[in-house]
Amino acid sequence: MTLLTTAELAERIKYDPRTIREQLKDSVLHEGIHYIRPFGGRKILFLWEAIQRDIGQESSSSLAIPMVKGAVAHG
């Protein structure tokens, strides 16, 4: 299991650390799945393998129309 700080995650996924903290955390990155708070503290450590697994998944709110043969049309 690879644990990353917010700055390390930002470097890997090319997002600003502030964007991760304010927009991604708790909307697409969930506690217990994508990040943990060791020892019940304030510090957050991100679980790289879980983020890597889920990073390519489309959000359920996207306008994607399933097509024949597995393709997707974006509306």
Image (cartoon, helix red, strand yellow):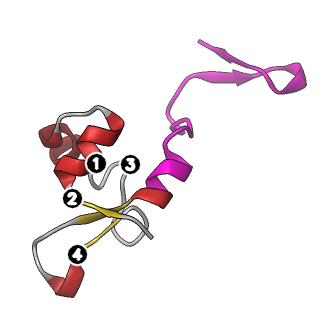
Magenta stretch encompasses residue 54: yes
Tell me the SS state at disc 1. Answer: helix
Highlighted range, magenta: 50-75
Tell me the SS state at disc 3. Answer: loop
Q: Could you tell me if the residues under marks 2 and 4 are in contact, i.e. CB atoms within 8 Å?
A: no
Q: Could you tell me if the residues under marks 2 and 1 are in contact, i.e. CB atoms within 8 Å?
A: yes
Q: Is residue 19 left or right of residue 59?
A: left
Q: Residue at x 55, y 35 (%)?
A: 58
Q: Which residue is mark 3?
A: 28
Q: Is residue 72 left or right of residue 62?
A: right
Q: Which residue is mark 4?
A: 37
Q: Provide residue 21's location: percent of width, then percent of height.
A: 17, 49
Circle count: 4
Q: Which residue is mark 2?
A: 5
- Residue 18 - label: none
Q: Quadrant of residue 57?
A: top right
Q: Residue at x 54, y 39 (%)?
A: 60
Mark 1: few/some/many CA within 10 Å (<14, 14-19, 20+): many
Q: Provide residue 49's location: percent of width, then percent of height.
A: 49, 59
